[in-house]
Image (cartoon, coloured by chain):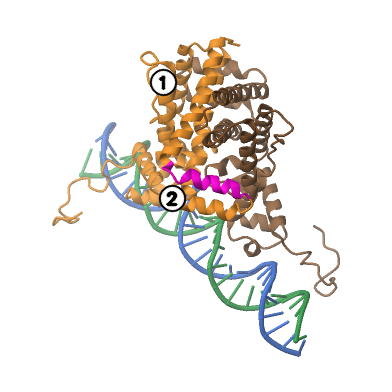
Chain colours: A orange, B brown, C green, D blue
Amino acid sequence: MTKQFSSVWTREPHPPRQAGLSREQIVKAAQEILDAEGLEALSMRKLGAKLNAGATSLYWHVANKDELLELVYDEAWGAVRLPDPDETSWREVMTTFAYSLQDAMMRHPWMTSLIGRMAALGPNALRLTDRLRKAFKKAGFTGIDVDFGCAAIMSYVLGYTIPQVAWIKAAGGDYDLDSIVAAIERAGADYPELVAEYRDLHSHDPAAHRAMAFDFGLLCVLDGLESRLRKGAGS
Amino acid sequence: MTKQFSSVWTREPHPPRQAGLSREQIVKAAQEILDAEGLEALSMRKLGAKLNAGATSLYWHVANKDELLELVYDEAWGAVRLPDPDETSWREVMTTFAYSLQDAMMRHPWMTSLIGRMAALGPNALRLTDRLRKAFKKAGFTGIDVDFGCAAIMSYVLGYTIPQVAWIKAAGGDYDLDSIVAAIERAGADYPELVAEYRDLHSHDPAAHRAMAFDFGLLCVLDGLESRLRKGAGS
DNA sequence: GAGTGGACTCGAACGCTGTGCGAGACCCGC
DNA sequence: GCGGGTCTCGCACAGCGTTCGAGTCCACTC
């Protein structure tokens, strides 16, 4: 940023405190650091510096780092889409939801580290579960089966994506297939068959393979849910 | 610890170096700390103290803390059971595997924090995936469906258990239902319906509910897999 | 205009972390 | 006795989250 001729003497009334610090601003900056550099790179000092503020100033707006993480975490949950079940078929709603959730986790890899550490109890997360439950009810599930259904599809998507993201991280962040395969080869000398199949598997487009594998399991879950729906048990 | 009359002069030949430090010993002690106090409580200094050694002595046997965590992590994977597919039905093998994996994660809650952070490439983890693949082949899956099947069941179990463990942690480690419900009530004032259902849901035995929900999703996945097996596609 | 009180910022400091470094201790084969 | 490899560890460094208390600024009231 080029500086005009202006100094302490000629500046406008309120330049340093430009609207001050706000909670939303802090959360937004934190998310940017997290997305760009990962969970371990986020420190209060760095975050303060990014906002042209002292590290300890943040503690006026946020109780501590954990609370800050909860805020960013819930913000990320807010990006997950779940179509209106009144306008779309049940399976389509769930499919869109599943892909949207996976997408959010891929775009914010730090989420996967938080899922195992703190419960998602923020307003966005609650809104999402509420809407997910409504979608299941709309589809015809009743009683405790609503819970079970929500848990089933949620579990699958999380469980598929979390290790996936861990692998991407382990490979250096850019899904470098060669290094993954190399690591497996180095570690798995005792299982030549497994190594060979892995190598064969990943010689094709990895993104396409990932999408197919995700879809396969998703269809399994949805088929399983649908057959239970048709049996119409309802605890 | 009370000290006998003994000093530098009267001690026996090799008292301090009592068999020295070993990698296995370190990993074992680390696992004990992790199980008892959680991931964040593990520090190199504390681990050294537990072994009556200096913190930096550990670095002779282990490259750094991350490598140490990989070792303990893989050790935990080694505890997961997968029955011999020659002696048991396919679905039973998978069910036992699923419950054993869930059990391992429940007993070592720190695992859930590591799954999203590092890939499971240790010998125990590789052996397990190798055996899982063999079980799927034995069941009749072929080609790429073997991978897809492994991913599907693995994903479901991980995805179900990881948030579950996070909730237990959030509730203070002892699955204190009241505090979970209270937290939801506090956070979810906008979704009275959801809160009411949660409260109703958890008023019964939580462990039983957890088992039922887990089983429900597991059956969905297994049914979905089985129907695909019968169709006998095989990419 | 002077004064007061709340909102907000921030530098210094504390106790903690992982880890590099170099000095030392111990034991074995010469 | 004497290297030399194996192993231990105290010191130090940079960084962390967080507390505390002093200080700045703004809006308001006399």
Expressed as whole percent of the image width and height from the top left, the position of residue B60 reads 64, 65
Can you say whether A133 is above or below A76 in the image? above
Q: Residue at x 39, y 39 (%)?
A: A107
Expressed as whole percent of the image width and height from the top left, the position of residue A22 reads 34, 39
Total number of numbered discs in the rendering:
2
* CB contact under 8 Å: marks 1 and 2: no
Q: Quadrant of residue B35?
A: top right
**Residue A197 lies in the magenta-colored region:** yes
Judged left or right of residue A64, residue B138 is right
Q: Amino acid at mark 2?
A: Asp
- Mark 2 = which residue? A176
- Which label number is shown at residue A198? none
Q: Real-space Cα distance between discs 1 and 2?
A: 33 Å
Expressed as whole percent of the image width and height from the top left, the position of residue B138 reads 65, 34
Judged left or right of residue A146, residue B84 is right
Q: Which residues fall within the magenta stretch?
A: A191-206
Instruction: Give the quadrant of the N terminus of chain B.
Output: bottom right
Can you say whether B49 is above or below D4 in the image? above
- Mark 1 = which residue? A93
Q: Chain of mark 2?
A: A
